[in-house]
Amino acid sequence: MNLIMHSWIGASVNAFDLKAAILARHAQHPVIVHFPIALFIASAVFEIVALWRKQPVLASVAYFNLLGAAISIPFTIATGLVAWQLQFEGATLKGNLRLHLVFATTTAAIILILFWKRFHLRKKGDSPSAAYFALMALGLIMITVTGHLGGILSGVETP
């Protein structure tokens, strides 16, 4: 596995080779994963600013960012599973790989629960509760840890 990781990080990789970037053994997951991360963080920021500034339009922006995060989750999970099979050759889930999977599925569940809750609040015209914001804060922590573990697995930190 270290040989696979080492050859992927090697100096011979051309960062501007579009064909190599698209067809790399796990290239899609590190690209796609940034969508739910950014959209979820943006949703949280807009939700807080909407409450602070009493601006319902910002709450709508938060809602649609959360919708985008929720929609992108299945693609992110699918590409993550493909990356596990291709990059790690379906290796046994242990260590950082298992932690990444556990944190990622927990984060995905939190985002989907928040979207479900926000969808119903929006239909009623209600504002989020303190429990909603607490779950959102937990989601932000979880997505940070998940991303950190993903960075380790993708070779950002050399073995």
Image (cartoon, rainbow, N blue to C red):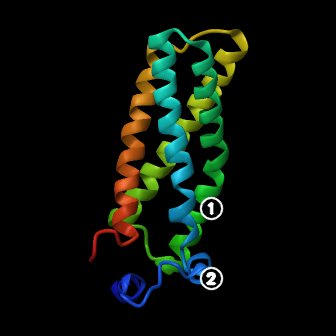
- At horizontal 51% and vertical 22% (from top left) the residue drawn is 47
Measured as percent of width and height from the top left, residue 134 is found at: 41, 23
Q: Residue flagged by tag 2: what amino acid is it?
A: Lys
Q: Which mark is residue 78?
A: 1
**Image side of residue 46 versus residue 97, left or right:** right
Q: Nearer the viewer, residue 22 or 138?
A: 22
Q: In which quadrant will I find the C terminus?
A: bottom left
Measured as percent of width and height from the top left, residue 105 is found at: 51, 49
Crowd rating for badge 2 (residues with CA inside 10 Å; few <14, some 14–19, many 20+): few
Is 31 situated above or below 123? below
Q: Residue flagged by tag 1: what amino acid is it?
A: Ala
- At horizontal 58% and vertical 57% (from top left) the residue drawn is 77
Q: Of circles 2 and 1, which is in front? A: 2
- At horizontal 67% and vertical 9% (from top left) the residue drawn is 125
| Mark 2 and mark 1: Cα distance apart in space | 21 Å
Q: In which quadrant will I find the N terminus?
A: bottom left
Q: Are marks 2 and 1 in contact (CB under 8 Å)?
A: no
Measured as percent of width and height from the top left, residue 94 is found at: 37, 67
> Helix or strand or loop: what does disc 2 sit on?
helix
Give residue 97's quadrant in the image. Answer: bottom left
Residue at label 2? 19
Measured as percent of width and height from the top left, residue 131 is found at: 45, 18
Give residue 32's quadrant in the image. Answer: bottom right
Q: Nearer the viewer, residue 47 or 98?
A: 47
> Helix or strand or loop: what does disc 1 sit on?
helix
Q: Which mark is residue 153?
A: none
- At horizontal 44% and vertical 21% (from top left) the residue drawn is 133
